């Protein structure tokens, strides 16, 4: 079987690589925009609890309650029909998953800010540290370490979510595998090959996540 | 001098400080004693302006801070600094970095040399490059004190820094305080170690129900005047 898998990978490598490029492009957008805007939204949700924090929590709750696939399909079919527009499925899928990522990241960041031990700031103040020093040297590094594991797990989940975009015809890896399977019907070998591709993407991401976690998230609790 | 006049502080309906007067003199150790819930920590936080009083005056080296304050004010940290009971060492920094980060603002000509002096004074060489969670409580307490000393404060307010230590560690920590006193630092120490207060304190303040029930030299612990302090010392000696 391994030979067949390799054979399929070699024969259809152009298709797989194109699918991989689409998957990575989509994941890149989801990660970059989601982490950036999500962090900003989380911070704003913390500093403006009533005006931004409360509506943000409401949106997060709704997004977490609606299955991703329903949300994706709703944006792809009914929403576009309602507004009489046709949007590239890649854009629709990227928008949907990015939106989920923004609110996911914002929730993590706001939660970490809510839980941040204020005593560390008080200790810094009585030691005469300036506000800028407190933010840069105390708050941000501790927040980074507090949020890193959850953020990394969320980003890996987001990568896995991109598979759903195949269902609205985005030519990403899963969609490519489905099309090849439709041509040669060797599901075991093809989906094994797909698994290999996802391993190739996810192993470095997970390895990076593990390395960052090991590097930055020491056990901060005191004995 | 660090003076407090007529400090009042309430949390909701509960009065914690009820017209407290207190004074801390540079180069002297003031022991603040009192039963749990008597307002010791609240008084310390008010004196350090960490949690300002509702009303009263805190005077630090001639500058008056009148409360209630309508405008924001800048407390004179780290001229007055605090070693908290929970220490609050920053967990992402090594113990050395915990000491150096605030000390860099103080303007040392040779900070490394000053740090080495403090490391030697507090016998921290063997663990100074560990992280807080790799150090024992006694080691962390020495680091918290070192962090405060290197800020060249005039006053260090210490909130039950020996509460979780065994007898030997308590002795090690408390034996440092006279060395700080020699450096001209005024120390306010909340402690339950009556014997230490007897031996080392220049002044004792006994706080009960938000009021100073008795004050004076350490001798008041031998011959207490107020019934409340007599009762407190009786209980302490009964418990051992």
Image (tube, rainbow, N blue to C red):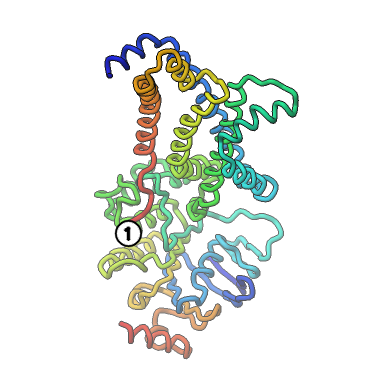
Q: Secondary structure at mark 1?
A: helix
Give the residue furthest to the right. Answer: A83
Give the residue furthest to the front. Answer: A185
Give the camera-side residue of B216 and A82. Answer: A82
Q: Residue at x 45, y 45 (%)?
A: A146
Residue B104 vertical placement versus A171 (above, below) = below
Q: Answer yes or no: is residue A127 visible.
A: no
Q: Quadrant of residue A12?
A: top left
Estimate the x, y position of residue B166 in percent, counting from the top left.
Answer: 28, 68
Q: Would you name the residue on which mark 1 appears? A: B137
Give the camera-side residue of A94 and B125. Answer: A94
Q: Residue at x 27, y 18 (%)?
A: A2
Estimate the x, y position of residue B219 in percent, counting from the top left.
Answer: 39, 83
Residue B197 vertical placement versus A206 (above, below) = below
- Residue A96 in the figure: left or right of residue B161: right
Q: Residue at x 57, y 36 (%)?
A: A100
Give the camera-side residue of A96 and A141. Answer: A96
Image quadrant containing the C terminus of chain B: bottom left
């Amino acid at each position: 079987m391994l030979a067949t898998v390799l054979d399929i990978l070699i024969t259809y490598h152009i298709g797989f690589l194109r699918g991989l490029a689409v998957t990575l492009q989509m994941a890149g957008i989801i990660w970059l925009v989601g982490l950036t805007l999500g962090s900003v939204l989380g911070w704003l949700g913390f500093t403006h609890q009533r005006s931004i924090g409360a509506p943000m929590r409401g949106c997060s709750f709704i997004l977490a309650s609606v299955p991703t696939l329903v949300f994706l399909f709703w944006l792809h079919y009914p929403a576009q029909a309602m507004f009489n527009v046709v949007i590239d499925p890649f854009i629709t899928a990227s928008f949907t998953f990015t939106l989920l990522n923004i609110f996911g990241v914002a929730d993590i960041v706001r939660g970490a800010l809510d839980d941040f031990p204020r005593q560390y700031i008080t200790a810094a103040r009585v030691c005469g540290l300036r506000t800028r020093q407190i933010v840069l040297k105390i708050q941000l590094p501790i927040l980074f370490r507090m949020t890193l594991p959850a953020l990394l797990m969320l980003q890996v989940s987001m990568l896995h979510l991109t598979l759903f975009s195949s269902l609205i015809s985005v030519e990403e890896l899963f969609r490519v595998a489905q099309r090849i399977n439709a041509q040669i019907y060797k599901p075991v070998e093809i989906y094994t090959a797909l698994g290999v591709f996802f391993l190739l993407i996810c192993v470095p991401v997970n390895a990076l996540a593990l390395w960052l976690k090991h590097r930055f998230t020491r056990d901060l609790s005191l004995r | 001098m660090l003076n407090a006049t007529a400090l009042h502080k309430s949390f909701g309906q509960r009065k914690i400080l009820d017209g407290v007067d207190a004074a801390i003199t540079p180069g002297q150790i003031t022991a603040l004693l009192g039963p749990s819930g008597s307002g010791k920590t609240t008084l310390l936080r008010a004196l350090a302006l960490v949690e300002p009083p509702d009303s009263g005056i805190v005077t630090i080296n001639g500058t008056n801070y009148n409360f209630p304050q309508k405008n924001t004010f800048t407390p004179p940290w780290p001229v007055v600094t605090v070693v908290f009971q929970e220490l609050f060492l920053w967990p992402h920094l090594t113990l050395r970095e915990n000491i150096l980060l605030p000390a860099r603002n103080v303007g040392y000509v040779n900070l490394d040399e000053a740090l080495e002096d403090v490391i030697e004074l507090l016998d921290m060489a063997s663990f100074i490059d560990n992280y807080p969670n790799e150090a024992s409580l006694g080691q962390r307490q020495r680091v918290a004190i070192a962090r405060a000393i290197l800020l060249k404060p005039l006053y260090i307010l210490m909130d039950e820094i020996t509460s979780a230590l065994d007898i030997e560690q308590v002795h090690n920590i408390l034996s440092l305080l006279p060395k700080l006193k020699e450096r001209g630092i005024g120390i306010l120490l909340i402690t339950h170690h009556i014997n230490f207060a007897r031996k080392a304190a220049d002044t004792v303040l006994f706080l009960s129900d938000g009021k100073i029930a008795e004050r004076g030299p350490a001798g008041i612990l031998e011959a207490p005047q107020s019934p409340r302090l007599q009762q407190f010392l009786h209980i302490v000696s009964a418990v051992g």
